[in-house]
Structure formats: structure tokens, C-alpha cells
């Protein structure tokens, strides 16, 4: 026996639904233009810093970021993603040898994974070494290049030397920049590696003032 299908009366007699008209505020043409400009500006603020830093970077990227630097700094968008990829390049460290008041010597490096704890402290000191490495030319660079770059990196190196002398109570400290070899995959397979490159940064000691000099 066939059973009749029973449908709810509300569904049978319900009128066809009609689209609900939007009641919210509508964008004006000026509002749309302003929002588009704001989005594009923020996109530029996100993209430009990794392209322009850290050094070395292209002249075009450096030129494009100049008018954006105030906003990049205010929004904390100065991220150096290019430092880590796609080609991070060789690593750097600052080696130091200190002469103590009793005539003995003490040595170390900045950063030092065996001493710099917690990990954040190691990272901070690692970035100090990389910052200075980006400013110091190679030891075989022309004399005029090394002379012109010295006012940029030497104040930073003097700060490092002063902190080391205060911490360890030394008389003078000799600093050098070390660039560690980063072998290519084929060199790793073949077991080849180049020697580390060491660039002298000078010998520093406290003068009569509280600042170290060379």
C-alpha cells in the first residue's frame, strides 16, 4: 500500500524567498582609492626591508626604501629575512686576544656558543658580529676603500673592545673578524673546504678616559 507523503504546511505555503538588501555603509570612490593606497603602501613596507637589508643589497632596493624608513621603523617592519634565505652566505665571528695585568693572555670569540646563554644572548652577539662584518672591507681591498669605511665600523669595534676590557679586566685587546667558509654542496660531497678568512680590526686599550682607543 502506498503511503502518502505529508509535508509541513509552512513549507508548502511559504512564499518564495527574496534577497535581503544590504543595509550597511557603502564605499565611496574616494574611500576605495584611499584603502587601495593604504594596502599597497603597507605591502611595500613589508616587502622593501628584506630586499634592502642586511648589507650588501642592491642599489635599487636601498634607494626605494629610503622614503619608507620612518614608517618601517615606527611599525617595526625592518625584518632581514634575506639574511637567512635563499643564500645566507658565510658566517662571521669576532676573535679576541686580551693581555691581562699580570702579563698572561686570554682569548675568546664573539659570539661564543659555550658561554653566551640563554640562546637569545648568543643571537644578539651573533648579530653584532654580522653587523660589523657588513661594514668591514676585505683585508686585500684597496687602501682608499679601507680608509673610507673605517669611520663606519671602528666606533662599533671600539664599543666591543671596551665591553670586553671591562668584563675581563684586561689591559689591551686585539680583535679580528673571521669569515667562516660556507662550502657548496659539491664541495661537501668531495670533502673540500677553504680556510677561514681573518681580517685584523686593531688593538685597543683604555686611555685616560673611559673609552678604549687604538
Image: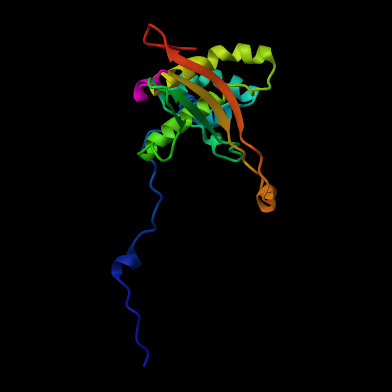
Q: Quadrant of residue 31?
A: top left
Extreme-bottom residue of the structure: 1
Rendered location of residue 95, percent (x, y): 50, 29
Report the residue at 60% width, 41% height from top: 86
Q: Quadrant of residue 159?
A: top left
Q: Is-magenta flag for residue 176?
A: no
Extreme-left residue of the structure: 9
Q: Is-magenta flag for residue 166?
A: yes
Residue range corresponding to the magenta coloring = 165-171
Judge by depth and name the residue closer to the eye, 200 or 79: 200
Rendered location of residue 78, percent (x, y): 47, 28
Report the residue at 37% width, 89% height from top: 2
Judge by depth and name the residue closer to the eye, 189 or 172: 172
In this view of the protein, can residue 67 be seen by the observer?
Answer: no
Judge by depth and name the residue closer to the eye, 67 or 82: 82
Q: Quadrant of residue 108?
A: top left
Rendered location of residue 149, percent (x, y): 59, 15
Left or right, 120 with respect to 155, comes to left
Rendered location of residue 79, percent (x, y): 48, 31
Amino acid at each position: 500500500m502506498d503511503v502518502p507523503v505529508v509535508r509541513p504546511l509552512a513549507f508548502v505555503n511559504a512564499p518564495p524567498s527574496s534577497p535581503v538588501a544590504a543595509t550597511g555603509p557603502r564605499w565611496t570612490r574616494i574611500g576605495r582609492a584611499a584603502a587601495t593606497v593604504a594596502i599597497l603602501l603597507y605591502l611595500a613596507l613589508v616587502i622593501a626591508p628584506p630586499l634592502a637589508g642586511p648589507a650588501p643589497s642592491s642599489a635599487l632596493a636601498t634607494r626605494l626604501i629610503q622614503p619608507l624608513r620612518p614608517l618601517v621603523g615606527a611599525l617595526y617592519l625592518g625584518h632581514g629575512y634575506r639574511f637567512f634565505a635563499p643564500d645566507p652566505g658565510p658566517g662571521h665571528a669576532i676573535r679576541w686576544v686580551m693581555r691581562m695585568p699580570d702579563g698572561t693572555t686570554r682569548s675568546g670569540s664573539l659570539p661564543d656558543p659555550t658561554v653566551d646563554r640563554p640562546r637569545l644572548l648568543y643571537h644578539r652577539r651573533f648579530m653584532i658580529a654580522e653587523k660589523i662584518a657588513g661594514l668591514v672591507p676585505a683585508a686585500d681591498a684597496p687602501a682608499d676603500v679601507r680608509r673610507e669605511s673605517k669611520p663606519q665600523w671602528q666606533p662599533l669595534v671600539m664599543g666591543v673592545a671596551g665591553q670586553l676590557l671591562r668584563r675581563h679586566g684586561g689591559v689591551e685587546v686585539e680583535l679580528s673578524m673571521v669569515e667562516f667558509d660556507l662550502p657548496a654542496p659539491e664541495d661537501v660531497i668531495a670533502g673540500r673546504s677553504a680556510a677561514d678568512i681573518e681580517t685584523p680590526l686593531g688593538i685597543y686599550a683604555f686611555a685616560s678616559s673611559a673609552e678604549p682607543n687604538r
